[in-house]
Image (cartoon, grey):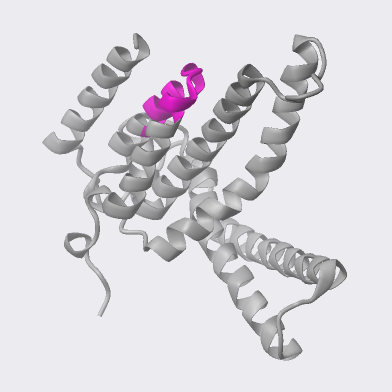
Amino acid sequence: MGLTKKNLGALHRLDPLSKWVALVCLAVLAMHWEDPRQQAVLLLALIAAARLGAGMSWRRLLRRIAWIVGFGLPLFVVTALAVQMREGGFGELLPVSAAAFSDAAVVTLRMVSLFLSSLTYIESTDPKDFVIMMTTRLKLPYRFVFGISMALTFLPLLAEEARQEAAARKLRMGRRPRGLTERLEQWRGQLVTVFTGAIRRVEQTAGAMDAKGFGAYRERTFLRDVPLTAVGVWTIALSLVGTAGLWML
């Protein structure tokens, strides 16, 4: 038996437009704040939203954060070294100053927050509802909105394909990869598999859309509507007011 919206988290029951406005407000704050403590508080709030609002399990959430941090650590090192060189080079006792460490932490936490907020939005949003609301409420071109919805649809599917491919490769080997060479070979195989699957899905989707005459008409109608409820209006208002207030901190 499938889960209904009543069985899911609060973010699943919220309309895509309200969540999109909140997402943009969070991105604005993340780009504006230059204090690592503010960035850390924002990241903790996003983790709570992903866990409680989107209903993501701790295992799944931590796996995604670890994946993002894998890209964030090189960025942290490069940023710290770049800031230190701009400040006049490296000292003998402390190669990286507190200011360089703080700037690098801000940049890294900002990247993690932006990625995690986007993943939470994808996790809690139905691509069909996204298309309907952005087309009917914001009056965006439906061709453009459908392109974004394809990304929202394909990303979870490709992530699942990567997980299945890793499990199948582990079964064939009978053990975990050993050494850097085997790990690089495994990652290369996973990337090739995911890329091939993505190309196949794009070709199938493009053929189906072309057969149905997608884009033949300027306007498009929908069988159902996604209403903007009072909760959604309050979410938009609180997001805008809260962002304006926190901007001044």
Judge whether residue 24 is colored magenta: yes
Q: Residue furthest left?
A: 230
Along the line of sight, which residue is nearer the eye, 176 or 3? 176
**Relative to 134, residue 187 above or below:** below
Image side of residue 235 versus residue 156, left or right: left
Q: Percent from the top left, x then y, of residue 145?
A: 48, 40
**Residue lying at 27% horizontally and 48% vertically, measured from the top left:** 11
**Residue lying at 69% horizontally and 65% vertically, measured from the top left:** 194
Q: Percent from the top left, x then y, of residue 134?
A: 37, 37
Question: Taken as a whole, is the magenta stretch helix, strand or loop?
Answer: helix
Q: Quadrant of residue 95?
A: top right
Judge whether residue 246 is colored magenta: no
Please state the extent of the stretch shown in magenta in the rendering: 23-39
**Relative to 120, residue 17 above or below:** above
Along the line of sight, which residue is nearer the eye, 238 or 69? 69
Q: Quadrant of residue 237?
A: top left
Along the line of sight, which residue is nearer the eye, 27 or 3? 27
Q: Could one spot residue 216 in this view of the protein?
A: no
**Residue lying at 43% horizontally and 31% vertically, measured from the top left:** 140
Quadrant in which the N terminus is drawn: bottom left
Q: Could one spot residue 219 in this view of the protein?
A: yes
Q: Percent from the top left, x then y, of residue 16?
A: 32, 42
**Residue lying at 74% horizontally and 63% vertically, measured from the top left:** 191
Q: Which residue lies furthest to the right in this view?
A: 181
**Relative to 57, residue 89 above or below:** above
Quadrant in which the C terminus is drawn: top left
Image side of residue 170 versus residue 102, left or right: right
Q: Percent from the top left, x then y, of residue 30?
A: 46, 25
Q: In which quarter of the image is residue 25?
A: top left
